[in-house]
Image: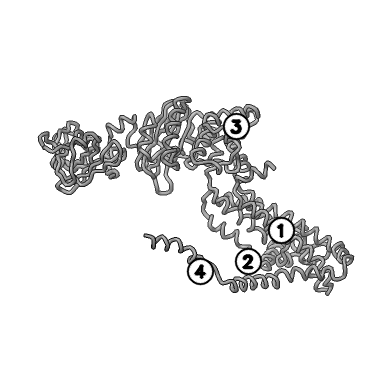
Amino acid sequence: MGIAVQHVTKTFGSFTSVNDVSFAVSSGELVALLGPSGSGKTTLLRVIAGLERPDTGAVLLEDEDATNRNPRDRGVGFVFQHYALFRHMTVFENIAFGLRVRPRATRPSRDAIEAKVKSLLELVQLDYLGSRYPRQLSGGQRQRVALARALAVEPKVLLLDEPFGALDAKVRQDLRRWLRRLHEEIHLTSVFVTHDQEEALELADRVVIMNEGRIEQDGTPEDVFEHPRTPFVMNFLGSVNIFHGRVDAGRATLGPIALEVPEHRDVVAQPATGYARPFELDVTRSDATGGGLWATLREANTTAGGIIKLELTDDEAGLVQVDIARDAYARLAPAVGERFYVRPRTVRVFLTGTEPAGIHQ
Amino acid sequence: MAGSVHRIASAPAHGRRPLTEPRALRWLLTGVALAFLLFFLALPLGVVFVEAFSKGFGPYLEAIAHPDAMAALKLTFIAAAIAVPANLVFGLAAGWAIAKFSFPGKNLLITLIDLPFAVSPVISGMVFVLLFGRQGWLGPWLFDHDYRIVFAVPGIVLATIFVSFPFIAREVIPVMEASGTEEEEAARVLGASGWQTFFRVTLPNLKWGVLYGVILCNARAMGEFGAVSVVSGKIRGRTNTLPLHVEILYNEYNFQAAFAVASLLTLVALVTLIIKTLVERRMARPAGNERLAEAA
């Protein structure tokens, strides 16, 4: 086991940042800590690194209790959100730092350090920039230097705090792909923090979704996306359409939409909310299929590439968002103001009041 | 369309005039500033050297080489040589504590650091007399054990430390606060010890701020009059610093000698200003250029 976090709680004054959180990362796994700002994900990462001391709970690294271990003895590599490169040192010196500060007995020779730094510079594709200073580099280059510096000490665990947060979209894409390839190459146990669901789902082997200091769901990207366990996860992982209604004895009635919900078989007359993603709705001109609702087309955004985003309003003036493929759009040939029958193929129904309300996107 | 293009094109020509003052006013303002500098700064400075050399080079050297003057010079250097390193250590420790940690009493500490700026130097001197003087709180015990503080070198050093201590802390705190704690955290995670982090990461980021503080601290330590005057007792050749020696010579109507010794202090001030300007220029330069300087 690479990392085990057991019942960790961390408070700052009266604010509980991390609230009784437990999760584990297997050796060689790449895990994303995903959540909105203030959800405690960065604090949790800093607890693993030893930069914050948990109030209660334990952190195990490679099956050894490291809760009270000094960060310098933990064998972790940490990449800071704003890189935290040493401003007064060259790129070369930055990367060599972790080796140079070792006690004489374990410090590599001068030549060995030089060779190591050179190979790391090649790994991050910056071998021509060794003599530059951090402020002479672009954001993406600084990020890669920070990564090389963290890898120089051969950590058992790599921790990255919002690794692409401060970069522009194009660089972010490139670096993301590059980091994925790097991880496949070196298979280092890694945890990265992000608030970008797309980034987490694309990059990670497993996603841990956090909200208000707690874990909402922990699973593979497919798992959390296809089977969100809470309304929060449903909301956080992309746009959703929300339908309010009731559940009674395994049958949900959400306005005009009615469907069977066997998982709520034992529920007697409780308020409930149904969620459907924009691409999980069919738009037709007839209500032959049933189980849907009539709505008026207000806008069709045709500029977004292969997907057309439709905005409709139902009879209660609620907004319904539908994504349809460009060819399906061409076949349908809808006009603004026309009425359509909108039928969700999948609706996830959560009882209202048992879970905290999520973010509405 | 053509009309609007014309308007846009002609706008800068019209716009430039109000951005500056009429030529006459510019000359007037510059002239006033220069005249002020001449009368209140350059002229007095010139007078020091004119008076110092009024009887020629021989008497000038004689006044400076006089044993009392040399003793005063030596004492001034001793006081500064103790006060500056002491305040350097204090300033770095205080800056570190204030910028990198939060603790109860932090604001009180920040306020206390400024105390020597707020208190009249004479009062600062009096405080030490009241503490360590023969009638002071600790005086009797000190005299019984034959420790001399007031009217002796230790008193002068203490007073000098007191009046010059905000300078380094004041320079270091904002620089440390601005640089945050991330680099230190990075160093720790990379395996550096506390001392390694301080000497390899924190201090190099601070070096120009520290140097600037040291220069100002040293200038104040060497030039201090009020506080030192109260604790010194002005024993010639033993507890006189340069500023005190100047005063004594002047009071004896020995103007030429007084100005000769004063010229030494003035030289210290000029050198300080030159170094300060160089350091300020260095601080303003982006760190990237350091490479060029180091390679040269």
Looking at the image, can residue A55 be seen?
A: no
Q: Nearer the viewer, mark 4 or mark 1?
A: 4
Q: In the drawing, what numbered circle is on residue A99? A: 3
Give the structural element (helix, strand or loop) at label 1.
Answer: helix
Give the CA separation, mark 4 to mark 1: 40 Å
Tell me: A181 left or right of B61: left
Q: Are marks 2 and 4 on the same chain?
A: yes
Q: Residue at x 51, y 50 (%)?
A: B102
Task: Determine which quarter of the picture holds residue B67.
Answer: bottom right
Q: Which chain carries label 1?
A: B
Give the CA separation, mark 3 to mark 2: 50 Å
- Whole-percent x and y of residue A215? 35, 37
Which callout, 4 or 1, points at the residue further toward the start of the chain? 4
Tell me: A252 left or right of B110: left
Looking at the image, can residue B83 be seen?
A: yes
Task: Determine which quarter of the picture holds residue A232.
Answer: top left
Q: What residue would you read off at disc 4?
A: B18
Which callout, 2 or 4, points at the residue further toward the start of the chain? 4
Q: Are marks 2 and 1 on the same chain?
A: yes
Q: What residue would you read off at disc 2?
A: B119
Q: Do the residues labelled 4 and 1 touch (CB within 8 Å)?
A: no
Give the CA separation, mark 3 to mark 1: 40 Å
- Whole-percent x and y of residue B146? 78, 58
Q: What residue would you read off at disc 1?
A: B272
Q: Nearer the viewer, mark 3 or mark 2?
A: 3
Give the structural element (helix, strand or loop) at label 3.
Answer: helix
Q: Of residues A60 and A122, which is closer to you in this image?
A: A122
